[in-house]
Image (cartoon, rainbow, N blue to C red):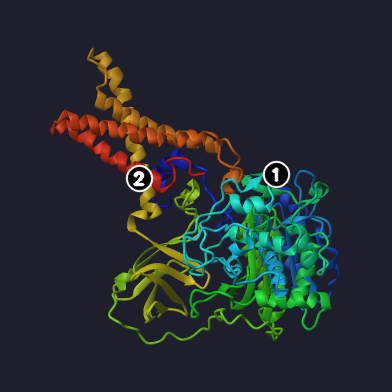
Amino acid sequence: MKGHGLLGILGLGLLWIGLAVHVAEARAYENAAANTSANTSANTSANTSANTSEITDDQPLHELLDAEAARLVAQHNTPGAVVVWVQDGNVEYQLSHGYGSLRDREPIHPETSLMRIGSVAKPFTGLAVLSLVDEGLLDLDADVNGYFDQPLIPETFDRPVTLRHLLTHTPGFDDFSIGKSTRTREELPPLSESVHNLLPRRIAPPGVFVSYSNYGVLLAGYLVEQAGGAGFNTVITDRIFTPLQMSDTTYEPWDQMLDRVVDGYFRVGGEFTEVPFDYVKDGPAGQMLTTVADMTRFMEFVTTPGPLPDEQQALKEQFLWASQIQYTHHPKLQDGMGFLWTVMEWNGHQVVAHDGGYPGLMARLMIFPRHNAALFVFTNTMNSWFISDVTGMMVDAFLPDAPAAPPDPAVPPDPATPSAPAATEPAEHFDDGRSLRDFAGHFRDTRYSRDSMSKIALMMGMVGEMSLWITDDGYLGMPDHTGATRRLVRVDTLLFASIDDDYHLAFREEGGQITHAFTSGRASLERIRSWERASLQTLFLILALLVFIGIILFFMIRLPVRVLRKQDARLGGVAMLVLTASGVYVLQMLLLFFGGLSIPVYELFSGFAYGVPGVFYVANLLPWAGLILTVALVFILIRSGRSTVSTVPPALFVLLSFAYLAALQYWNLCGWHF
């Protein structure tokens, strides 16, 4: 919407205000509040856990961190926050700040308060999978359909989907969010039903590119349940949580435990709205609850150098296996995917990490293997800026001068696993006569819903798009993280290297055509046609709606004017069809607008997790009425047999109507795409 100004605000306000979706890990909304809130800043470092108070070796540093954390909490206006730093198996810093419940003025208690950590749950699901793989109960490279009596995944492509694909976010599934959650435990279906009911369409062969998939982790969790011979929560508790002494961690909280859950909040209009606790149908991907104490035990486990007790040593080897790069788009690219871990560099440090986001929470778990260090940050509102600022504060405090510790011996990677990318100097130019125009164009992040109305997240700017162009001096150009032009030269068939910094860009080709661009080992973008760009589509829909509104206003003014002039105010067939079709299109957007207002904002930001409002079913049938009216208009114009100036406006309206209907169909706003 940027750049369209007031016109864009008015147009999309009538179109799909509030229908923003998939605000999660990397898509959290910007919390712009900078004023201190009494609700969030009164309870300061007095709530620092006992572990922190016992640390005295560097007390001035801890006092400085306490003060800086308090400042960030106030700056970002977060209700409550947790920060933990563990190094060499020892807790170096731990802070619980603010409130777990604004209503009761209750702090976050490290030993008892249960935090919902969103997608930080995924790596734990991955560890459960690997523990079963180690025992031969699951096979990373077997067709997952082999675990079902009847094949679950359609044979859309020749290549089968395997657990390796599920654990590296490369199964090639479409994304989907509508109806993925329930308000009560009683409504929550078993995993055996969810893997069938939530199955998305396959959009690409597996192993081709990374596209974050909650469903893939749900399916992996269901296989844990099947191979483990018990419910998912029972299996992961027995295999992961019990050996690590994480006794208060669960994916299935009992009703008695809900009183201990940290309340989540969503900021609307300067005030916090409490987000009720709910249940996600893809539980293995994000339903985990834990305490500060339990998460600290996990961090101690992964950062302790040397041998561990027997019941933990096998888990440590599985963690080391999972935390290596298991998939990357190209060996020269930065970053990659472990088994449900992101492996990357952060400010020059190698990091194994995962973020979690959901309305009412934001969490981050980062492990620095070369320093035997780990960081956990949590806040009970969706605020990625706070998480990022705290991460920078902690890394600057503990790692700038820390010598890199030799990593623990890791499990050798699977022979089929791509090795970690190595940084190299750009090679000489590669030239096989292919034009740079083949690589220039427009690209879109691959994670979005192609089959549901939540696709409109693209127009809300929640799914990234990128353009590549040919610069004046003959290079392939792309924007860097500051927006400046980065110039790239071709150094291999499908690989480019920057002449401005240490960066590589890779491509995928199919049938002689470039289909994808890979900006890192874990980030993929699909090629789109120029007219598919969200900015152009948004502008067209806004202008079309304004034309339809203008037509309605014209006839509203025309009627009294003709009556006052004692002229015939009746409308002919053509005019009536044009007016009615315009009214239908505007009515649809009004119904979507008021339907969006009928539900809490945090539900919109979860992607209609409980389903869409009933009025949407009516609204998205209206375009079919518009189609019928437009076809009738075409029929009348053809029957008239006239080719005069008077037929030009209705003919132009026909063209506009068909183009508008095509756009609605493209955005899944024509029919029930829920």
Query: Would residue 447 be seen by someone viewing this image from the given angle?
Result: yes
Earlier sequence position, callout 1 versus callout 2: 1
Label 2 secondary element: helix
Residue 553 against residue 422 in the figure, above or below: above
The residue positioned 55% from the left and 65% from the top of the image is 161
The residue positioned 43% from the left and 84% from the top of the image is 426
The residue positioned 39% from the left and 36% from the top of the image is 623
Q: Amino acid at mark 1?
A: Pro
Instruction: Tell me if 452 is positioned left or right of 238 in this view.
Output: left
The residue positioned 72% from the left and 57% from the top of the image is 288
Q: Where in the figure is residue 385, as x and y percent of width and height? A: 60, 60
Q: Where in the figure is residue 176, as x and y percent of width and height? A: 54, 52
Q: Where in the figure is residue 146, as x and y percent of width and height? A: 61, 64
The answer to whether the residue labelled 1 contacts the one labelled 2, judged by CB atoms less than 8 Å apart, is no
Q: Which residue is mark 1?
A: 276
Residue 309 against residue 558 in the figure, above or below: below
What is the residue that sits farthest to the top in this orientation?
566
Q: Where in the figure is residue 113, as x and y percent of width and height? A: 80, 55
Q: CA distance from mark 1 to mark 2?
A: 38 Å
Residue 508 against residue 218 in the figure, above or below: below
Instruction: Quadrant for residue 622, please give it.
Output: top left
Q: Which residue is mark 2?
A: 662
Instruction: Tell me if 467 is positioned left or right of 97 in this view.
Output: left
Instruction: Quadrant for residue 11, please give it.
Output: top left
Instruction: Tell me if 414 is positioned left or right of 454 in this view.
Output: right
Which residue occupies the foreground of this view, 74 or 398?
A: 398
